Structure formats: C-alpha cells, structure tokens
Image: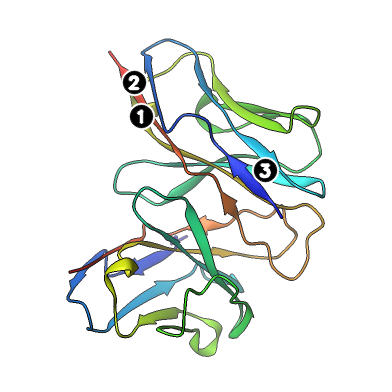
Amino acid sequence: AQSVTQLGSHVSVSEGALVLLRCNYSSSVPPYLFWYVQYPNQGLQLLLKYTSAATLVKGINGFEAEFKKSETSFHLTKPSAHMSDAAEYFCAVTPGYGGATNKLIFGTGTLLAVQP
Amino acid sequence: EAGVTQFPSHSVIEKGQTVTLRCDPISGHDNLYWYRRVMGKEIKFLLHFVKESKQDESGMPNNRFLAERTGGTYSTLKVQPAELEDSGVYFCASSQDITGAETQYFGPGTRLLVL
C-alpha cells in the first residue's frame, strides 16, 4: 500500500528565507509524486509533479522538488520565500504503473506561514 | 476554459438531514473524482467516475453516501442521513485521462458542517 508522510504540519519562515517542506513516501512500485498548494478559499492547484522523466522537477512560482529514491523523499523547496507563498501544501502519490484508477493518496498537509 | 466548479460552497445542516453536493468538471474530462478532508486529517479519496460509470468506489465511507454522474457530465454526492462525522470539506477533481501521471484539477470544495 502506498502512503505519504509530511513532516511538520506547520512551518514558519521569514520572507526571503529558504522554504523546505518535507515529504516521504512509501510505495511498492515506482510512484508518481505530486505537490499541490491550496491558497485560502481556493481549490488545490498543482505546483509540480514527478513522472520519472527527471529527478529534479521545477514547478510554478519558483518551487522545485527532487525525487530521491534512496531516501524515498520528494521534498519541496524554494530559495526565497515570498509573502504570497503562505498557503497549505500537500504532497501526494499515485501508483506509477497507471491502471484503472489513479486516486491520489495525500499527506496531511503543511501550513506555511511567511513572516515579514 | 472554466475550471472545476462545486456547489454549494458551504452547507450547514442538522444531523439526520440530507445534503446534495454538486460538481461540474472541466468540459471534456471523462474522469471525475471525489475526495474529502475531515478537519485535521488528510484528504482522502472517495470515488472515481469514468464517464457515467463508477470505476472505483473503495473510499466511500458507508451506504449513507450516494454518488451519481448523469450522462457523464456533472456529478452529485448525496449524504442521507447526515451524521456529525460527515463534516468536512468535499473536493471534486477531474482529469482527461488515466495514466497515473495526469494532473487532476480540483474545485474549490464544499464545506459541510453537520450540527
């Protein structure tokens, strides 16, 4: 069975500081991995996804994530936080072999606060 | 292109009442998913439609939940009778295909509170 663990339900950084949101996965097959963001009063928006093409994935708004199979991790980073990055971030996984259904399995989410 | 829309945005009902949530997927998306987030917990899968057929309903909590997708377009999720533990945010998502790598596009969610 697949699962996702997000370490830290709340992360606070200063504006301009590095953002690091952690995600570890468990999967018996090579996974596809996703980071979604939810801004207040909005739906989930895809930030980036890993589909086995490249281990370093660049997404929108300056975010990127690196797939590390040996560490079963897919941590999200951004070099310099902006006030507009304050949101809740979700890591998710689907089985990489495709199939009849591709339900996303989510972590519990990390709420990012950016201090001025 | 219009995104995924959900109605209502909020619903407050009493225990034992019935509530129906609606989701309109992105036009042309055959795949429609329902998810739920109970407060403080992770977002959990409820079910998956391909056109009008239920492909996977393994996440439906119990038989008080009934999902339909008429004509393969919009979908409704009915809770009858509602219980306190049904409170949460119900998300709908749609996608064009099923490769595992496809993007699921989410609606803003319906916030359900059962008193």
Q: Nearer the viewer, residue A2 or B22?
A: A2
Residue ID at (82%, 49%): A29
Which residue bears the numbered disc 3?
A: A33
Would you say the residues marked 2 and 1 are in contact, meaning their CB atoms lie under 8 Å apart? yes
**Residue at left offset 47%, top offset 60%:** B1
Mark 2 vs mark 3: which is more N-terminal? 3
Q: Nearer the viewer, residue B22 or A6?
A: A6
In the image, residue A39 sits, relative to residue A75, either above or below, namely below
| Callout 1 secondary element | loop
The mark nearer the N terminus, 2 or 1, is 1
**Alpha-carbon span between mark 1 and mark 3:** 22 Å
Q: Identify which amino acid the numbered label 2 is placed on.
A: Val
Q: Position of residue B37 (x, y in %)?
A: 41, 57
In terms of secondary structure, where does tag 3 sit?
strand
User: Which quarter of the figure is the N terminus of chain A placed in?
Assistant: bottom right
Chain bearing tag 1 is A
Q: Compared with residue B27, is residue A80 higher up or lower down, i.e. above or below?
A: above
Badge 2 local density, few (<14 within 10 Å), some, or many (20+)?
A: many
Tell me the colour scheme of the image.
Answer: rainbow
**Disc 2 designates what residue?**
A114
Task: Give the number of the disc on residue B11.
Answer: none
Q: Secondary structure at mark 2?
A: strand
Query: First in sequence: mark 1 or mark 3?
Result: 3
Amino acid identity at mark 1: Ala
Q: Which mark is residue A86?
A: 1
